[in-house]
């Protein structure tokens, strides 16, 4: 009887050891037959991290790794065959899409000319300007934000509202005294930029201030805003060429890339047919 008991205990222990994989060198955790190794977490903890935080980060990582392994095991057992087959097809297609996209992008980057001439930009703009209407108002303006007690305030006002390029030396001298400023009123700005630079203007009062040709003096605390609105383009109007130049360039380059991809796809198919690597059976 005892011999049978010892035999059963031995077989039980032996079967447990046999069914449980032994720890592998440098492994730090196991889930079923999957192991997590020291190499997998070597860059996990940033240098200088306190020991308690390091321990917590490593433990959280291990727990997350284990839960993912356990969940995928459970999913493989419990999901239906049709559902798993559908996911497997998606995975295969994703791999195909990922590889081909990366390969085509590499070919395109090597072959597509990224220089777009001014002439080409203007031609594309003239032929397609109806497709480039504004989503919101665009403004050209100049402004200064300075202290009201500036001793040269009246002179600055006079020169600002009667702006001349010949006053460049004056502005170079006094610009350092301003809290902020922008003199280049040939650049178009959208309303989000205006609200950011001129916080006294907001969507509720913008129609009061954003008017072509308007001159503004707005005191705010100890400061004074001087603003000259040069021009305004309202929503749903054809966007100005200078404002659209970066977008036009991007559109032209994307068009070139698409043409290059179509050309390459045709060439690779034609070559495969020629080399008898591609056949359609009738």
Image (cartoon, grey):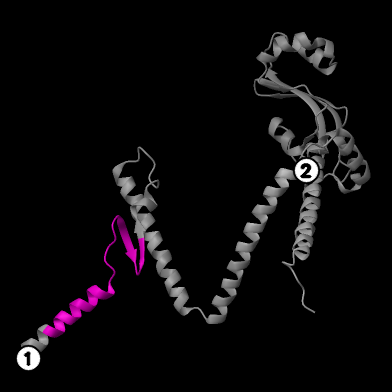
Task: Quadrant for the N terminus, please.
Answer: bottom left
Q: Position of residue 254 (x, y in %)?
A: 78, 48
Q: Residue at (37%, 55%) from the top-left corner? A: 60
Name the residue furthest bottom: 1
228 sits left or right of 150 in the view: right
Determine if the magenta segment contains residue 11.
yes
Local packing at callout 2 (Cα closer than 10 Å; few below 14, some 14-19, many 20+) is some
Q: Earlier in the sequence, mark 2 or mark 1?
A: 1
Q: Nearer the viewer, residue 261 or 277?
A: 277
Q: Which residue is mark 1?
A: 1
Q: Residue furthest left?
A: 2
- Within 10 angstroms of label 1, few (less than 14), some, or many (20 or more) residues? few
Which residue range is magenta in the image? Answer: 7-35
Q: Find disc 2 in the rendering and name its residue.
A: 250
Quarter of the image where one finds residue 68: bottom left
> Does residue 42 belong to the magenta stretch?
no
Residue at 63% across / 63% down in the picture? Answer: 96
Residue occupying the point 70% across, 30% down: 197
């Amino acid at each position: 009887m005892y011999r049978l008991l010892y035999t059963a205990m031995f077989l039980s222990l032996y079967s447990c050891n046999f069914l449980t994989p032994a720890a592998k060198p440098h492994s730090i955790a196991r889930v079923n037959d999957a192991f997590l190794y020291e190499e997998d977490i070597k860059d996990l903890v940033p240098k200088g991290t306190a020991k308690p935080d390091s321990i917590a980060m490593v433990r959280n990582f291990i727990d997350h790794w284990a839960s993912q392994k356990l969940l995928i095991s459970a999913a493989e057992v419990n999901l239906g065959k049709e559902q798993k087959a559908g996911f497997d097809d998606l995975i295969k297609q994703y791999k195909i899409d990922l590889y081909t996209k990366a390969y085509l992008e590499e070919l395109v980057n090597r072959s597509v000319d990224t220089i777009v001439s001014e002439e080409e930009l203007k031609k594309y703009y003239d032929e397609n300007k109806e497709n480039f209407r504004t989503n919101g108002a665009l403004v050209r303006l100049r402004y200064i934000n300075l202290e009201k007690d500036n001793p040269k305030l009246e002179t600055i006002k006079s020169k600002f509202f009667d702006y001349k390029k010949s006053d460049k030396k004056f502005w170079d001298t006094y610009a350092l005294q301003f809290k902020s400023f922008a003199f280049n009123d040939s650049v178009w700005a959208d309303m989000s930029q205006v609200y950011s630079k001129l916080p006294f203007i907001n969507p509720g009062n913008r129609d009061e201030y954003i008017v072509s040709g308007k001159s503004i003096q707005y005191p705010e605390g100890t400061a004074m805003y001087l603003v000259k609105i040069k021009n305004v383009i309202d929503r749903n109007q054809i966007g100005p060429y200078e404002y659209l130049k970066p977008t036009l360039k991007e559109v032209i380059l994307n068009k070139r890339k698409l043409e290059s991809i179509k050309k390459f796809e045709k060439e690779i198919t034609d070559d495969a047919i020629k080399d008898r690597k591609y056949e359609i059976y009738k």
